[in-house]
Image (cartoon, rainbow, N blue to C red):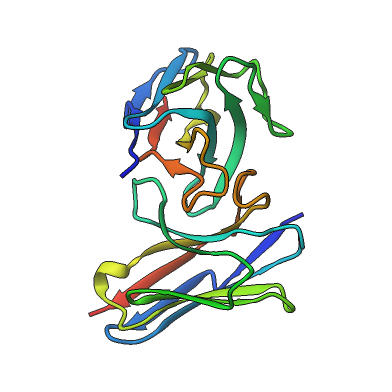
Amino acid sequence: GAVVSQHPSWVICKSGTSVKIECRSLDFQATTMFWYRQFPKQSLMLMATSNEGSKATYEQGVEKDKFLINHASLTLSTLTVTSAHPEDSSFYICSARPRGRRGGNQPQHFGDGTRLSIL
Amino acid sequence: QQQVKQSPQSLIVQKGGISIINCAYENTAFDYFPWYQQFPGKGPALLIAIRPDVSEKKEGRFTISFNKSAKQFSLHIMDSQPGDSATYFCAASWDSGYSTLTFGKGTMLLVSP
């Protein structure tokens, strides 16, 4: 089955540093990847949609200069949290949509998330 | 404005019982309705999904019931097991699932032994 790998799974860093999270589709090509944020006991909140080779589309209220997204290839998207602060601590989850699978049985495959803790 | 309303927020069911989680949507353009299961510290995993051309879909112990006129759909877990204890999210999207997913707020299910 389609697998999406996220790395790292857990990161702890000091306030003010930048953190990069990788999202890879391991056995399929993904023209579109999605980045979500999830607070404890809450639902997934879409942050941005990234298409390979173009700029990401950010949801309202999400700072694009704070959360930099790069979708450089059909199998890799990265989310960089710049100058992270404690309020950025959260669970970040990516998903990937297989290329050419319009109307498929599983439009999005999710990664296992990255737990980000800013001290 | 929440487009997909999910209830209950939490649910406790005895082993062997039936777990029922309900969702209601507002956007009539939605045409793809998946349910996701999420364990702590993991990403959501697709459990089962339905499209509006059918009223029910069953996969093993999991069944989705869909009521297009009422704009409601529900997940039934038959013979619930402790291993089913997780958070369940309903979601909806349009364009045959090609558009972004709109998630419900989630239901924490606990199946007691």
The residue at the point 69 percent across, 33 percent down is A59
Residue B11 place in picture, x, y as percent: 45, 76
Give the total of numbered labels: 0
Residue B5 place in picture, x, y as percent: 66, 65
Hey, which quadrant is residue B27 in on the image?
Answer: bottom right
Question: A1 or A19: which is nearer to us?
Answer: A1
Residue B106 place in picture, x, y as percent: 52, 61
Compared to residue A114, the image places residue B21 above or below, namely below
The residue at the point 25 percent across, 73 percent down is B82
Looking at the image, residue B61 sits to the left or right of residue A83; the answer is left
The residue at the point 51 percent across, 41 percent down is A101
Residue B25 place in picture, x, y as percent: 70, 65
| Residue B105 in sight in this render | no
Compared to residue B77, the image places residue A72 above or below, namely above
Hey, which quadrant is residue A6 in on the image?
Answer: top left
Looking at the image, residue B92 sits to the left or right of residue B26; the answer is left
Q: Quadrant of the N terminus of chain A?
A: top left
Compared to residue B107, the image places residue A31 above or below, namely above
